[in-house]
Amino acid sequence: EDQVTQSPEALRLQEGESSSLNCSYTVSGLRGLFWYRQDPGKGPEFLFTLYSAGEEKEKERLKATLTKKESFLHITAPKPEDSATYLCAVYNDYKLSFGAGTTVTVRA
Amino acid sequence: DAEITQSPRHKITETGRQVTLACHQTWNHNNMFWYRQDLGHGLRLIHYSYGVQDTNKGEVSDGYSVSRSNTEDLPLTLESAASSQTSVYFCASSESTSGRADTQYFGPGTRLTVL
């Protein structure tokens, strides 16, 4: 059974204070790892897909990396608008298995 | 622009009533999914469909049903609503791509309260 664990559950940052979110997974044959952003009262919004260990992708202040057992989402010099819940999911057999998410709060 | 919509956005019902949540997508995607989201559990898959007339059970399917009569719609029915089904429900869709992980795009969600 696919398992996805995200840590920490919550992260409070000062504006400009860089940090990383962790997503560890166990899956038989990873076909892809997804990162989504979710704002309160809204549906998840797609950020990145990573397909193989060593791959990295960037978007503005976010950078996602992937190893054989975990993925990291690095937030560089965050701004208050980066406050959201970040969800990680692994893809297998045409379905996604999600972690519980990390809620990031960035204070001005 | 293509999109995925859900209705209603909020629903309050009573225990034992039948409830149907609508999901409509204009992406022309073959795959559609229903999830529920509860604190501490993340998103859990209820049912999914890979095309018209195809439906499959996810990890938390008890008490729910779906039917797929066209490409655009996948309604979710709670046959007899229970308080444990109070949750936020999300619909998603993806395009079938051979050999690559499909990106799922999510609707805005329906908040359901069962009293």
Image (cartoon, rainbow, N blue to C red):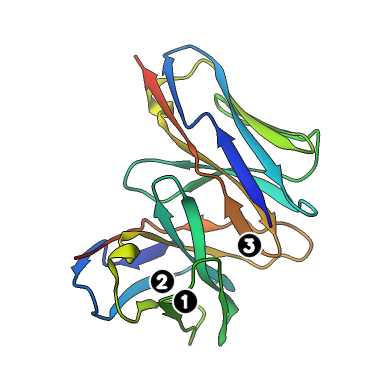
Cα–Cα gap, marks 2 and 1:
5 Å
Tell me what residue is drawn at x 49 percent, y 67 percent.
B60
Q: Which mark is residue A70?
A: none
Does residue A101 appear anywhere in the picture? yes
Amino acid type indicated by mark 2: His
Which image quadrant: the C terminus of chain A?
top left
**Residue to which mark 1 is pinned:** B72
Please give the chain letter of the residue carrying mark 1. B
Rendered location of residue B17, percent (x, y): 23, 80
Where residue A20 sits, quadrant-wise, is top right
**Residue to which mark 2 is pinned:** B24
Where residue B18 sits, quadrant-wise, is bottom left
Amino acid type indicated by mark 1: Glu
Mark 2–mark 1 CB contact (< 8 Å): yes
Instruction: Check disc 3 and report its element: helix, strand or loop.
Output: strand
Q: Which mark is residue A95?
A: 3
- Seen in the picture, residue A26 relative to B55 is either above or below; the reply is above
